[in-house]
Image: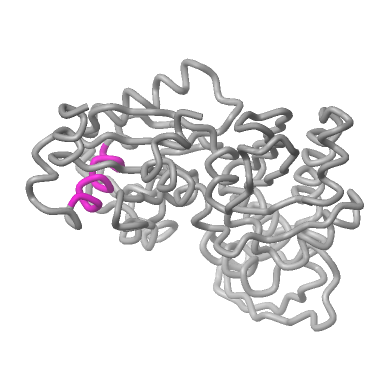
Amino acid sequence: MLMQKLIRFFSTDIGIDLGTANSLVYVRDNGVVVNEPSVVAINDKSEVLAVGEDAKKMLGKTPINIKAIRPMKDGVIADFDITEVMLRTFIQKAQTCVPWYQRLLRPSIIIAVPSEITEVERRAVKESAKKAGAGDVMIVEEPMAAAVGVGLPVYEPRGNMIVDIGGGTTEVAVISLSGIVATKGVKVGGDELDRAIVQHMKRNHNLMIGELTAEQIKIKIGSAYPLEDDKVLEVRGMDMNSRIPKTVKVTGEEIRRALMEPITVVVEAVRIALDKCPPDIAADLIDSGIMLAGGGAVLKGLDRLISEETGLPVFVSEDPLNAVVTGTGIMLQNDLIYRN
């Protein structure tokens, strides 16, 4: 017991949401201290030029000798070496907010991962974190961390459903007594919504746009359910025929139609998870409803669409983007919660 207290005194406890689109880092007693895009820029000599926000600004705008890489794909590591560099950078940034003596030992880290990844992929995450400077590395499923982060009573003997819509994956889980009763994961998230917008602009407007532009369209006028005040947005890109810049106007209604295919996959994942539920837990959901978390949860009208399709009440968490990393932080603050 004394040894554990000494280790805790001289080290940092860190929780990480290692996401496809963004990575967030929580430091015990300090809260969320890092929230940056999961992007690394390197040159043709494999030298790292930028990590996080600075690297994201380079997406689609780099010269031929520089690449902006997203090392996470569908919630798992696609590029081991680049992920290690990114993790090391974020861990070092997180440690700047703690006293010097808490940097003497390697930090203990909890990392949230998709619930349906393989054991090999789990080991890859652990190995990458250890090479990046971590001491003890513990793994927790993203939907469980999200459920804890949004304040669902996961320890009670009643059903709670969480839908965590991230950048690369959507995780649906029904939780009771600190365990996952039913789950369904699909490789559809915010990135797939952006790609749907890119394809729509090509097919319907003969316009080429980049990822960042598609993301802005989604944020400004994207929706999953008809809105009373559908907006019109001017979009700039490159004409596919003339290869010169041009501007077109798009409506919220047409973007909603463009997003329907990936949104339908998310709704179907919710249906499948519900179908796996035991009857008594399914009955609990009539009262507790469905909680949405993750960046995709802020898409306008998504809660109304899922509610209409399932007949259950649907809520958007107060801080959906930080739900998973906040859950890892709560586990750091309360060891008993994590052990459960």
**Which quarter of the figure has residue 319?**
bottom right
In the image, 31 versus 198, the foreground residue is 31
**Which quarter of the figure has residue 336?**
top left
* Residue at x 75%, y 45% (from the top left corner): 266
Question: Is 72 placed left or right of 253 in the picture?
Answer: left
Considering every residue shown, the one lying at the far front of the view is: 1
* Residue at x 30%, y 31% (from the top left corner): 129
Measured as percent of width and height from the top left, residue 311 is found at: 91, 52
Measured as percent of width and height from the top left, residue 141 is found at: 54, 33
The answer to if 264 sits in the magenta stretch is no
Question: Is 135 placed left or right of 32 in the picture?
Answer: left
Number of numbered discs visible in the structure rendering:
0
- Residues shaded magenta: 85-95
| Residue 28 to residue 174: above or below | below
Question: Is 218 placed left or right of 121 in the picture?
Answer: right
| Residue 169 to residue 290: above or below | above
Colour setting: one colour
In the image, 80 versus 68, the foreground residue is 80
Measured as percent of width and height from the top left, residue 88 is found at: 24, 40
* Residue at x 57%, y 69% (from the top left corner): 216
Predominant SS of the magenta segment: helix
In which quadrant will I find the N terminus? top left
Measured as percent of width and height from the top left, residue 121 is found at: 47, 22
Considering every residue shown, the one lying at the far top of the view is: 120
* Residue at x 61%, y 37% (from the top left corner): 155
